[in-house]
Image: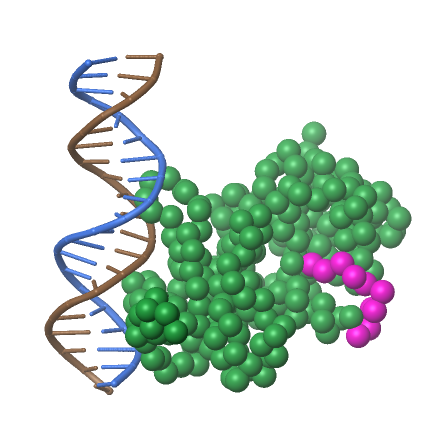
Chain colours: A green, B brown, C blue
DNA sequence: TATTCACACACTCGGCACGC
DNA sequence: GCGTGCCGAGTGTGTGAATA
């Protein structure tokens, strides 16, 4: 054993894993990587941010997680850390949750995927905010990995996966299930987008697509429209929102476009209510 | 006009005290 | 002993004024 590894071992701190620590590790398993402020909001809402961050650091010192810079610069200030699972964290999950550690991705995410993972968590937090404001109820957020594992038993031909599946209930309404897709601008029409949307349409669930910019929506709408016609469903089956707007104004504050260009605020349609159309 | 520097800001980190 | 909260120092980055 080298001096360096001895030093690292000596530095490692013992930690008794609490239920919410396990919960944090589960979230890292589901989302692959999560920022420190995101993890604090998601897993430690009852303690201060600073204490939550300290707990995350202890998890890291105990070897369950690793961290790197998010690289996100939103104005001034030091970029926050993002956390990911290590092999020890994966083994802890196997011990506490029965998930085979060999199937758990560990290590830092590729730079290419980092922003995608972080945006998915941000959208989830925006949904949680909406739930806290009682704009929706019974929110359940399942990442693609878990949901599609279950679904594949019934639809074995379906290979494309949504980034997440959301279950929610509007006030005085029945629960609904929605497929969520985060678009970071890398999809190609025939290679990625069309097989993905066709697979989603087979489930019958509505589709929410979060894109990086408004102009990108026009492209995605153009690609999607024929697929909706082919599946004989209406333009509201697949709707598009801009990430920055959702983060700034919330899920229900942002403008969402149906595939035909009309605007929706996501709230259930009332009888006799007309919606504005995009010129 | 380009460069330098001080400052602001947001976040990290470690120490300390307190309560359980 | 461990978790928590507070505090102050340190770090990395952007901003804007001063200077060559």
Query: For this rendering, which residue is in front, A124 or A129?
Result: A124
Q: Which residues are magenta?
A: A153-162
Which residue is rendered at x = 69% and y = 48% of the image?
A239
In the displayed structure, does residue A26 sit left or right of residue B8? Answer: right
Judged by its main secondary structure, the magenta piece is: loop
Q: Is residue A253 visible?
A: no
Residue closer to the observer: A139 or A174: A139
Give the answer, above or below, for where A147 lies relative to A247. Answer: below
Q: Position of residue A274 (x, y in %)?
A: 69, 44
The quarter of the displayed image where residue A180 is located: bottom right
Q: Quadrant of residue A204?
A: bottom right
Find out whether residue A159 is within the magenta segment.
yes
The spot of residue A139 in percent (x, y) is: 57, 67
- Residue at 45 percent across and 61 percent down: it is A83
At horizontal 64% and vertical 33% (from top left) the residue drawn is A215
Query: Viewed as shown, does residue A45 lie left or right of A151?
Result: left
Q: Is residue A142 magenta?
A: no
A64 sits to left or right of A180:
left
- Quadrant for the C terminus of chain A, please: top right
Say which quadrant the N terminus of chain A sits in: bottom left
Query: Where A169 sits versus A237, above or below?
Result: below
Q: Work out whether A178 lies above or below B5.
A: below
Instruction: Residue at the far front: name it.
Output: A2
**Left or right: A268, with A75 as reference point:** right
Where residue A108 appears, x then y in whole percent?
A: 51, 59
């Amino acid at each position: 054993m080298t001096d360096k590894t001895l030093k690292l071992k000596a530095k490692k701190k013992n930690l008794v894993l609490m239920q919410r620590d396990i919960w944090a590790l589960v979230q890292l398993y589901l989302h692959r990587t999560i920022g420190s402020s995101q993890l604090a909001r998601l897993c430690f809402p009852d303690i201060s941010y600073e204490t939550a961050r300290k707990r995350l650091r202890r998890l890291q010192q105990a070897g369950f997680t690793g961290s790197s810079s998010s690289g996100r610069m939103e104005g001034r200030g030091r970029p926050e850390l993002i956390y990911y699972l290590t092999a020890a964290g994966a083994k802890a999950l196997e011990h506490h949750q029965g998930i085979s550690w060999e199937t758990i991705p560990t290590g830092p995410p590729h730079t290419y995927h980092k922003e995608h993972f972080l945006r998915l968590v941000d959208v989830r937090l925006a949904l949680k905010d909406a739930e806290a404001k009682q704009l929706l109820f019974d929110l359940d957020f399942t990442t693609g990995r878990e949901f599609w594992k279950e679904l594949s038993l019934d639809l074995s031909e379906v290979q494309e996966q949504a980034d997440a599946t959301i279950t929610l209930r509007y006030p005085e309404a029945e629960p609904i299930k929605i497929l969520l897709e985060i678009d970071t601008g890398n999809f190609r029409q025939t290679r990625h987008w069309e097989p993905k949307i066709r697979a989603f349409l087979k489930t019958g669930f509505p589709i929410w697509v979060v894109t990086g910019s408004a102009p990108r929506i026009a492209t995605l709408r153009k690609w999607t429209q024929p697929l909706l016609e082919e599946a004989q469903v209406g333009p509201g089956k697949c709707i598009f929102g801009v990430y920055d707007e959702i983060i700034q104004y919330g899920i229900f504050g942002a403008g969402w476009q149906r595939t035909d260009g009309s605007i929706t605020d996501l709230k259930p349609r009332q009888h006799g209510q007309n919606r504005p159309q995009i010129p």
